[in-house]
Image (tube, rainbow, N blue to C red):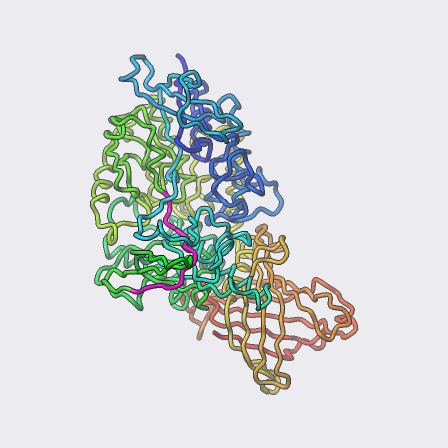
Amino acid sequence: MRSKKVAIIGKHPSAGPSGLVTAKTLLHNFTRGTFAPVVFDIRHEVGGLWPNQANGTQARKATLDPSMRTNLSRFTVAFSDLSWESVLGDADIPMFPRARQVGQYLAAYSERYIPKDVLRLDHRVVAAVRSSEIGTDARWRISWVKESVHGINLDPNPSRDEVFSEDFDFLVVASGYFARPCIPEIPGLAQFTGQIVHSSTLQKGNGSPVGHGNSQSHGNVAIIGGSLSGVEAASALALKKSSLKLNVPAEHQNKARQAVYHIYSRPFWCLPTYLPRDAPEDKVSFLPLDLAMYDLGRRPPGPIEYALGPIPEDKAAKTDDYFNTLLGTEYAQFGHMNGANTEQKATHRPPWVAIGNDYAEFVRSGAIKSIMGRATTVQPGPDSGLASIKIESANGHAMVLEDVSSIVLATGFTPFESLSFLPADVLSALEYSTDDPFLPLVLDKGGTFRSETPDIGFVGFYRGPYWGIMEMQARFLGEAWAGKPNESYKTEGQRESLRVLRKADSEIHRSQFPMGDYVGLMESFSADLGITRTKLSIGDRRSGPVVPARYVHGMITAGQTEVQRTLNSLQAISNHSHGPAQAAASLAIFRALHGSWRFIRSVPATGVIEASGTAVFHPRHPSDPKYDREYVYEENVENGPLDRTTESILRLSEAGTSNTTSQIEIWTVVPEASTKAPVVRSLKLTPFHRKKNNGEYLPGQYVIHAESVHLTDTDYLTQSGDLGQTTYSFHFKGVSISSWECMYHGNGSEDRHVRSRTVYER
């Protein structure tokens, strides 16, 4: 029997994660020769939107900034049968890989599993015609053109001689949601002569184009749009502003005076990348947010159901309560954006989620000014390059934001172009709507296919943590097309829920993503495919996070080895004393120090107050590229023997998950030293635990202790004998540090008493 030919295509790149996992699954998870997949892609290299070079200069430039880190951990941004250790080696592997490293992962995945002749790169699909029109036994005829100069020169109207065609049994659409940036129709926007930038083109580092090349670049910056991209854009611009203040002379600080306004239309929580999790006894650890939130233990007892449809008000309220408890009430003041000061609504709307380590603290400091409402008009000024933006809240209140010189549109993408090559009758059968970018198609089985059109499937046409879902979708299509009998392949149960969701009020009952129950959807696919979830430790299988490596399907031996490497690494994360847990705590501390503190320094032996004042951690772009994050620490003594200002630099590398590389370093130049070589210390964390009061654990409160380790042995330290130890205690409420202490101890085994103690509070 001949192999079933499968065309894997998309209007945009299809040799990204969705196309590659589909080809691999059809080739390796089923009897050899069952399928003959072909992946068409207009680019010259695999990876789709993910660049695999540091500068992103692939044949066709990728959309994502190569230096950008993923906002979910490497355990979620991966397929089941390729470990990150196999891609980057067993050295220190980042918990949150950079975009270019994801590109390297996809290139390695393709190299390992997909023969070269399966990939038709530099091929642009121009038509897909279904069997009723071609009169053959095949179901689809795919037409394409070969791109010149590796896809750089696109001819939208190729001549007939340049078009090639081939027949296939099945078609997989693998181009995803992110077809074209969404540009909202705001009256006056087109007439604005200042800068307009879509967030997808906004570089997150020093190279951000906003504020450059504009004579009015000292005007305000407005970010329009909430959710993930809005938070990322606002944080990037606030960091740029903070860096300019620290690095640029005062007379050249016009850009540093820009105010950053974030305009969002619905409530959201901004989550840091690491969240606290109680461990056995009194221990606590910080886990990547996806491992914490997608833990099976969070689901109620009984079978895990896939939740699909409008979000009822009581469930939205429970979500808010969960985040408030997990993150803490102090953090919620700045990390829960709900317009509480400007808008009171009778209904409880489903909160959206954004991810960012700096956003809440920038809001606390005033570096980001958040406004809940919709930008309804842009009014350009006469020949000034500036504009005013009218913002209206849901209750009818309005305000005007003046002197805007730059607008960043964090308005997401529209998926329609990804579907434009499909025949009209197929789109009609899929209930295609050009009016609803949230839910353009009504598909069964987690957005995979429809029983009325069984020869077309979708992989990656999904918004959310999609790597595991893509793998499940590819497996499901393979099982259905291989002819294996299973009643679940013909079910129509999910489409009615989607129809109801389409009709629901988008402002009140719609969740952030149409298929947002990641855990439920993974479990639903697992049940349909007969996959037994791998347990992580002794005890119930129904515990631990949902990650692709726990769901094994038709795996080859080499794939089993990869699964085990990933699961071994995942097990280590749960050990609070293991390197990754220490690295996570370092980032949690570093993030929470951001901003201003009041301090009192005293001598414990006498109780005498030596000094008091303010301390500020100013974030800036790292001055050394080997670090990811950097503060300038400024201490202003207001009451003490010497009123003075001192500075240090705090640095953190997120390069890996080892406690030897992901640790906080403190760089200080000692004025009394004969040389200006900095004294460098690192913070070594000691076991951290839950906080107690009168023998009772305090919910959501933790203490992390640390001691300084000298990384330099300068002449000054040696001559002065000032090699005493400094210890720290960081007191957390949720994810915020409520207070912290710095204690300087004497030098030598007989002089370990605390010489001075400094307490910092907000």
Considering depth in this image, is 273 or 152 the residue closer to the camera? 152
Task: Determine whether, in the image, residue 519 is placed left or right of residue 614.
Answer: left
Q: Residue at x 42, y 71 (%)?
A: 696
State the image coordinates of residue 334 (x, y, percent, origin top left).
40, 65
Image vertical order of residue 724 relative to residue 31, above or below? below
Count how many numbered circles sit on residues in the image.
0
State the image coordinates of residue 500 (x, y, percent, origin top left).
20, 43
Considering depth in this image, is 725 or 501 the residue closer to the camera? 501
State the image coordinates of residue 213 (x, y, percent, origin top left).
51, 53
Query: Which is the main secondary structure of the residues drawn in magenta?
Result: strand
Considering depth in this image, is 606 or 435 the residue closer to the camera? 435
Q: Is residue 678 magenta?
A: no
Q: Is residue 405 magenta?
A: yes
Considering depth in this image, is 575 or 149 the residue closer to the camera? 149
Image vertical order of residue 224 relative to residue 129, above or below? below
Q: Residue at x 36, y 53 (%)?
A: 225
Q: Residue at x 43, y 31 (%)?
A: 14
Q: Which residue range is magenta in the image?
A: 399-413
Image vertical order of residue 756 relative to residue 495, above or below? below
State the image coordinates of residue 390 (x, y, percent, origin top left).
31, 60
Which image quadrant: the N terminus?
Answer: top left
